[in-house]
Amino acid sequence: MKLKVLGVAILLMVSCNTKKTDSVAINEVKAEIKVEAPSTDIQGLEIYDFEGLKPFLNEDDDKIHVINFWATWCRPCVKELPYFEALYEKYKDNDVEVVLVSLDFPHQFESKLKPFIKEKQLKSKVIVLDDVDSNSWIPQVDKDWSGSIPATIIYKKGKRSFFERSFTYNELENALKHFLN
């Protein structure tokens, strides 16, 4: 496990200094890797790489999708989580789906993330994005995203809004209301 964490840390450091041509080579190698179903640990936490996360970002149905990128170590993220939970409770019968995408570190899933989910009794769907190639997937989420969290996408069919900021409940509900009509 320590070697895996060390490997992730090295990949993060290297990816910060890669050139565009390196990204192309990495993407060519990735294209050869078979995409598999999410990894689910023994307590049911769904863990995806970015390819596995993509379907959550592009559902083509009649629901309004609210996707929030967060982490337990991000204070503004933790502060706004109750607003996403309240939004989910209020609008779940109006075809609104809330998905909380955790960016917590893999070595903290057991010690921080799972206890946090249990303690806060999160009702929204929580999934984990475990993909170290953030230079590749961040611009695919939104071309203007710097990678800072919290970040939120709200979409329905062809209409989509991206927010790289934290919300109050009223701000979040107002953003959602643009999709309700």
Image: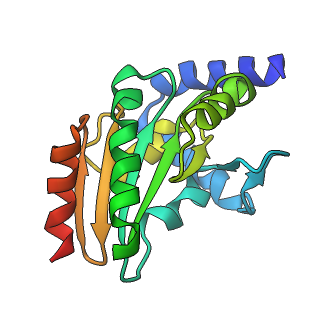
Horizontal side of 12 relative to 21 (left or right) equals right
Report the side of 155 relative to 138 (left or right): left
> In which quadrant will I find the N terminus?
top right
Q: Quadrant of residue 64?
A: bottom left
Residue 24 percent across, percent down from the top left: 50, 47
Q: Locate residue 112, reporting x and y percent.
A: 65, 24
Name the residue rendered at 50%, 46% in the picture: 101
Q: Is residue 165 above or below residue 16?
A: below
Residue 30 in the image: state x and y as whole percent. Answer: 65, 53
Q: How is the image coloured?
A: rainbow
Q: Quadrant of residue 118?
A: top right
Q: Residue at x 41, y 80 (%)?
A: 60
Residue toward you, 101 or 134: 101
Query: In x, y percent, where is residue 149?
Result: 36, 32
Label count reads: 0
Q: Is residue 56 above or below residue 85?
A: below
Q: Nearer the viewer, residue 37 or 44?
A: 44
Residue drawn 41% across the image and 48% down it: 85
The reply to whether residue 17 is visible in this rendering is: no
Q: Is 159 positioned to the left or the right of 64 in the image?
A: left
Q: Is residue 57 visible?
A: yes
Quadrant location, the C terminus: bottom left
The answer to whether residue 82 is left or right of residue 34 is left
